Amino acid sequence: MAEASALKKSLPKINKVDAPYWQAAAAGKLVLQKCRDCGKVQFFPRVACVDCFSGALDWVEAKGAGKIHSFTWVRVPRNPAFKEDAPICYINVMLDEGVIVESRLVGDSKDKVKMGDRVRVVFQETHSPEIKLPMFELMGSPR
């Protein structure tokens, strides 16, 4: 079996619907879609508003902050490429804009996570220059 460090972690495949999201993330910005017709903010990127089905969607920059809605720990990743990352804390974050995003909790203090903790977005480099992954760290964590 190949060493975990030699394995490449899988990355999202960028398409025309979510390309603006990944371009913003590569620039260190978290963006969401907002409907011009009804004002609904949504995540993940789609071709139409989930509330009124309008195709009039704009990209708006999110504050990048929210609170832990739920979390779980993975101590033994199924993919060997993630072995060095274990234990991994997967989280659902209720952003201040009112949408839930799935991500990972990173940082030295992640082992202290509790429901409702405030978090902020950080961007992790990958083996692709086109993709930085939005992850979160506990507020108050040293940068």
Image (tube, helix red, strand yellow):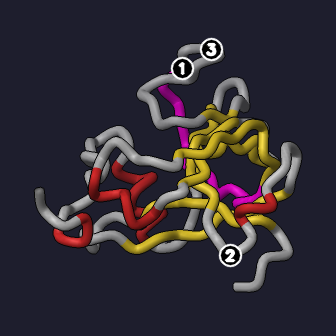
* Of 117 and 12, the residue lying toward us: 117
Please tell me how many numbered marks the rendered image carries: 3
- From which residue to which does the magenta span run? 54-65
Which type of secondary structure does the marked residue at label 1 adopt?
Answer: loop
* Of 132 and 45, the residue lying toward us: 132
Within-10-Å neighbours for mark 2: few <14, some 14–19, many 20+: few
Discs 2, 3 touching: Cβ within 8 Å: no
Q: What type is the residue that disc 2 sits on?
A: Asp
Which quarter of the image is occupied by the N terminus?
A: bottom left
Closer to the chain start, of discs 2 and 3, is 3
62 is higher (above) or lower (below) than 101? below
90 is higher (above) or lower (below) than 84? above
In reply to whether residue 59 is colored magenta, the answer given is: yes
Residue 128 figure quarter: bottom left
Q: Nearer the viewer, mark 2 or mark 1?
A: 2
From the top left corner, tell me how far across and down residue 4 is, in percent. Answer: 25, 64
Discs 3, 1 touching: Cβ within 8 Å: yes
| Residue on which disc 1 sits | 54
Within-10-Å neighbours for mark 3: few <14, some 14–19, many 20+: few
Residue pushed farthest top?
Answer: 52
Residue 13 numbered mark, or none: none
| Residue on which disc 3 sits | 52
Q: Which residue is drawn at 62% across and 33% down?
A: 42
In reply to whether residue 95 is colored magenta, the answer given is: no
Q: What type is the residue that disc 1 sits on?
A: Ser
Which type of secondary structure does the marked residue at label 3 adopt?
Answer: loop
* Of 16 and 68, the residue lying toward us: 68
Residue 108 numbered mark, or none: 2
Residue 135 figure quarter: bottom right
